[in-house]
Image (cartoon, helix red, strand yellow):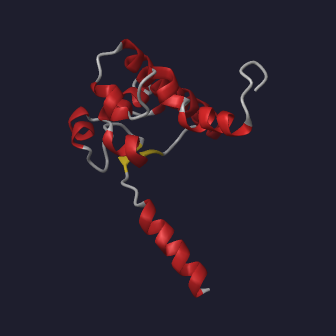
């Protein structure tokens, strides 16, 4: 705010629209676009995204004393086999390993180790519709 002289709307735009993958890559917040690009900034953005997943996964596993299942969902979790593979890489010690063929196919259960690793499609519109219906009926 002080350095750039931004007002609240400009700061909101910076944080919500120009940060994250777009801020890291310099050109897109769409994982599909970044994965298809040969731009080194795109690769850095994807690598950092995977790094953050791995960091949080390790922290949560430590806090919980292990995990029984890992679920990938949402647009990236459902559709990016690259992100799923990267996120799980090196977690064999935790019981997490992927079957590469199942991962590429986007199967429901993609694990090849004792910890279940799942790809679960989301349907946000249906959840919202149910919540609205419950509120109106209510």
Identify the image quadrant of residue 43.
top left
44, above or below 10, in the image:
above
- Residue 97 in view in this figure: no
Residue furthest to the right in view is 2
Please name whichever residue, 19 or 100, is drawn nearer the observer in this view of the structure: 19
- Which quarter of the rendering shows the C terminus? bottom right
Query: Could you tell whether 107 is left or right of 118 in the image?
Result: left
- Residue 105 in view in this figure: yes
Please name whichever residue, 63 or 36, is drawn nearer the observer in this view of the structure: 36
Please name whichever residue, 48 or 14, is drawn nearer the observer in this view of the structure: 14
Query: Residue at left 35%, top 37%?
Result: 113
Query: Could you tell whether 127 is left or right of 64 in the image?
Result: left
Identify the image quadrant of residue 116.
top left
Residue furthest to the top in view is 40
Q: Position of residue 2 (x, y in %)?
A: 79, 22
Q: Position of residue 50 (x, y in %)?
A: 45, 27
Tally of numbered discs: 0
Query: Residue at left 30%, top 51%?
Result: 108
Query: Could you tell whether 42 is left or right of 68 in the image?
Result: left
45, above or below 84, in the image:
above
Q: Position of residue 111 (x, y in %)?
A: 33, 40
6, above or below 78, in the image:
above
Query: Residue at left 20%, top 36%?
Result: 101
Q: Position of residue 135 (x, y in %)?
A: 60, 79
Query: Residue at left 57%, top 32%?
Result: 56
Query: Could you tell whether 134 is left or right of 101 in the image?
Result: right
- Which quarter of the rendering shows the N terminus? top right
């Amino acid at each position: 705010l002080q350095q750039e002289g931004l007002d609240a709307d400009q700061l909101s735009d910076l944080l919500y629209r120009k940060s994250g993958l777009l801020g890291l890559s310099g050109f897109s917040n769409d994982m599909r676009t970044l994965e298809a690009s040969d731009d080194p900034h795109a690769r850095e953005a994807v690598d950092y995204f995977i790094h953050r997943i791995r960091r949080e996964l390790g922290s949560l596993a430590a806090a919980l004393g292990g995990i029984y299942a890992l679920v990938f969902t949402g647009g990236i979790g459902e559709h990016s086999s690259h992100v799923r593979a990267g996120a799980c890489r090196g977690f064999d010690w935790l019981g997490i390993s992927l079957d590469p063929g199942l991962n590429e196919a986007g199967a429901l259960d993609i694990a090849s180790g004792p910890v279940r690793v799942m790809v679960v499609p989301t349907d946000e519109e249906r959840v919202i519709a149910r919540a609205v219906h419950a509120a109106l009926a209510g």
